[in-house]
Amino acid sequence: MLVQLQHRLDPMPSNPETQIPNAGTIAFVGGGNMARSLIGALIRGGVAPRSIRVAEPDAATRDALARDFGVGTHAGNADAVRGAGTIVLAIKPQVLEAVCAELGRAIGDAAPLIVSIAAGIRIEQIERWIGRPLPVVRAMPNTPALIGAGATGLIANARASADDRARAEAMLGAAGRTAWIGREDLMDTVTALSGSGPAYFFLLVEALEDAAAAQGLPRETARMLASQTCLGAGRMLAQSGEAPSTLRERVTSPGGTTAAALAAFDHGGLRKLVATAIAAATARGRELSARGN
């Protein structure tokens, strides 16, 4: 589904400030949707396809990556990561421990930058599984990176140099906006907010569509108006630099239709419900981390 979405939507322009410092060879372990989106963004930003390798066990996925982007592909992880300056861990958290142990043997005495986009897995776990200290950046992107509109939280360990941090930021910035997070425990909140956030947005649009259709509006029209309204509001918020409360107040006339709808949201406890949802997702992220201990 996400691959189909990527082919239907034109990517947003790449960030013009995403030159990758001292990139060398970038090896992706895993060639799924998120890796694909990052690879596409890097190439649109000027990274040479020949400097990117991908380890992916599925032959059809390897063929598609090689055909669509011209990158080198490998069935085995060791072949892809050997000699790479940056290794991007783009695999499921459940298999990361075994993969890290394999990578530790494959890289030998080299000290590549490790960038992990695995949800819930802490930097300390990655270092322990690889078997020795390395510069590590943990990142949490989200699916809008597929169209160059991602939001990514980043945190680095003490071994990551300024150059390492700049490299990781540029790589993830090629697919959207980035923010450095001060404490690693807050990455679970990042996961709950922006990592899972697109699903909350889709649920809102779904609910708006259903409500309008129930009032008699044709469903296709309701979907278009709901999605375009949310898109426009999001762009206004991102580009204006103003607080969402300011923009909300500006469109809310006393006694008007917007005020009536907002009063209904307040009566239903919307803010409390959102806070409960974020807390639940954050707690689940912590559970995923704890399982790796």
Image (tube, rainbow, N blue to C red):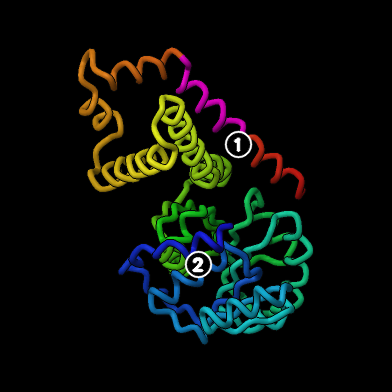
> Magenta stretch containing residue 165, yes or no?
no
Residue shown at 44% from the left, 55% from the top: 150
Q: Which residues are magenta?
A: 268-280
Percent across and percent down for residue 40 are: 47, 71
Residue shown at 40% from the left, 64% from the top: 11
Percent across and percent down for residue 162 are: 44, 66
Vertical comparison of 213 with 121: above or below: above
Percent across and percent down for residue 96 are: 72, 60
Q: Amino acid at mark 2?
A: Leu
Q: Secondary structure at mark 2?
A: helix
> Sequence order check: which comes first, mark 1 or mark 2?
2
Residue 161 seen in the figure: no
Residues 164 and 20: in front is: 20
How many numbered circles does the render carry? 2
Q: Tell me the crowding category of disc 1: few under 14, some 14 to 19, or many 20 or more residues within 10 angstroms, Cα based.
A: some
Residue shown at 44% from the left, 52% from the top: 151
Q: Amino acid at mark 1?
A: Ala
Left/right of residue 130 with respect to residue 253 in the rendered view: right
Vertical comparison of 47 with 164: above or below: below
Percent across and percent down for residue 47 are: 43, 79
By secondary structure, the bulk of the magenta-drawn segment is best described as: helix
Identify the residue at the far bottom of this view: 50
Task: Using the rendered view, name the quadrant where residue 99 is placed.
Answer: bottom right
Distance from the alpha carbon under mark 1 to that under mark 2:
24 Å
Residue under label 2: 38
Residue under label 1: 281
> Magenta stretch containing residue 277, yes or no?
yes
Residues 257 and 154: in front is: 257
Q: Secondary structure at mark 1?
A: helix
Residue shown at 46% from the left, 22% from the top: 270
Q: Quadrant of the N terminus?
A: bottom right
